[in-house]
Amino acid sequence: MTPVIQGERLLERLQTLAQIGRTDSGACCRLALTDEDRAGRDQVVAWMRELGLQVHVDPIGNVFGIRAGRRPELPPVMTGSHIDTVRSGGAYDGNYGVLSGLEVVASLNEAGVETERTLVVAFFTDEEGARFPPDMLGSLVFVGGMHLDDALATRGIDGAILGDELRRIGYAGSSPLPLPAPEAFVELHIEQGPVLDAEGTTIGVVENLQGISWQEITITGQANHAGTTPMSMRHDAGYAAAAIACYLRELALEMGGTQVATVGKTDLSPNLVNVVAGRASLTVDLRNTDESLLQQAEQRLAAYLQQLAEAEGVEIESRRLARFRPVTFSQQVAEKIGQKAEALGYSHRRMTSGAGHDAQMLARICPTAMIFVPSVGGISHNPAEYTEPADLVAGANVLLHTLLDLANHGV
């Protein structure tokens, strides 16, 4: 019997999970290791157990649903993503990849199909980094890129300690960390960008991923009266913050290519209408597919900060929040994804991921690639995030047949 994705079941699970952490504005808010995240975890684990999967939780809270193959001595094939969200998230980011993995298992069970290699469906802790920096924290620890003790000691934006929150919600596991490296890892995800939707293409075969540089910049000036302090005598932290934001936009436009730059968060103190800001902090997000160009952007920003501090008589300090090099995925795994999309009759294209994903961490230890499906209007990290049901089912079908190939024949 040939396994078949049951689209209605996949869509129902997506909507059920989206209700956990739903806000009055319609957003999905399950910041990592909050009560809402615990409820989401409990639901996904319950589904895993209903499907007969063995559930393992490691010490950083990553969860693995394991479907044994005929040859358990062989490295397993893994799929998955994350279920934590940003504060204003949608229904699909991360969740789609995890629940599609469960749908693959369900379809194999119903068809009575055994695989040579074990299949693992995973969801990783704190992929978003919205509460505990850096992003992809759980998968970073899983592959040995961050020491467990350092991760557990991470302080969140609300002052909470990651290890304390893991224990509080009951997901400080004891399974060995790390597990043996998988034969391959495939992550299915919504694009979160406009390319596939604009082109009318169903499947993105993701072959590389941009490097990411996050910084927090703190500016210390002098708070003073907004009416009595001449412009030439100000040490205005607010102006300096605005100047940095404008400079970054000009830098990205000048460099062109895949270079992007974003100031996503700014805080001023004392934050009053009639006071020159004495202190400001802002976050900087730089990304590029070329490591040398990403370094160039970092260096040019550092030089500008020094010039600005001298010109405005302020102190500027920069603290690194996260730094990941660009990733090139496995061409063999990407080729299999493209072949399956072709065989199933779906339009497809090779492409780059502009967002960070757990797959970039898994690529450090095993052959890895990603599957994208369209995001309508390119909207994500937003309650309006949407992917057409037919595209969701198409991506899950490509995942099913890619995993079957990998589980029976390897990379």
Image (tube, rainbow, N blue to C red):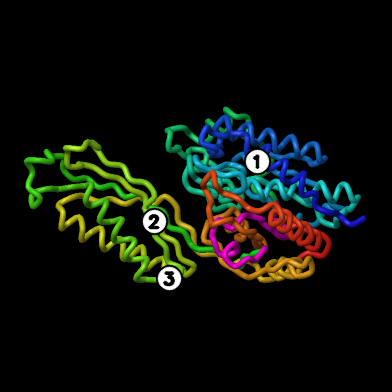
400 within the magenta span:
no
Q: Secondary structure at mark 2?
A: strand
Instruction: Place residue 359 in its image quadrant.
Output: bottom right
Question: Is residue 90 at all visible to an observer of this figure?
Answer: yes
Q: Earlier in the sequence, mark 1 or mark 3?
A: 1
Which numbered disc, 2 or 1, marks the residue closer to the eye?
2
- Assess disc 3: are there few (<14), some (14-19) or many (≥20) residues with their C-alpha within 10 Å of its C-alpha: few
In this view, which residue lies farthest toward the right?
1
Instruction: Place residue 168 in its image quadrant.
Output: top right
Marks 2/3 in contact by CB < 8 Å: the verdict is no
Please state which of residues 279 and 73 is positioned toward the viewer in this rendering: 279
Tell me residue 102's x, y (percent).
75, 46
Tell me residue 116's x, y (percent).
85, 57
| Left or right of 291 on screen, residue 315 | left
Q: What's the CA distance linking mark 1 and mark 3?
A: 35 Å
Q: The disc labelled 3 sits on which kind of residue?
A: Ser
- Assess disc 1: are there few (<14), some (14-19) or many (≥20) residues with their C-alpha within 10 Å of its C-alpha: many
The residue where tag 1 is placed is 58
Q: What's the CA distance linking mark 2 and mark 1?
A: 34 Å
Q: Secondary structure at mark 1?
A: loop
Marks 1/3 in contact by CB < 8 Å: the verdict is no
| Left or right of 287 on screen, residue 84 | right
Q: Secondary structure at mark 3?
A: helix
- Assess disc 2: are there few (<14), some (14-19) or many (≥20) residues with their C-alpha within 10 Å of its C-alpha: some
Tell me residue 295's x, y (percent).
39, 66
> The magenta stretch spans which residues?
180-202
Q: In the image, which disc is placed on residue 292?
A: 3
Question: Is residue 32 at all visible to an observer of this figure?
Answer: no
200 within the magenta span:
yes
Look at the image and tell me in which quarter the C terminus lies.
bottom right
Please state which of residues 75 and 408 is positioned toward the viewer in this rendering: 408
Q: In the image, which disc is placed on residue 262?
A: 2
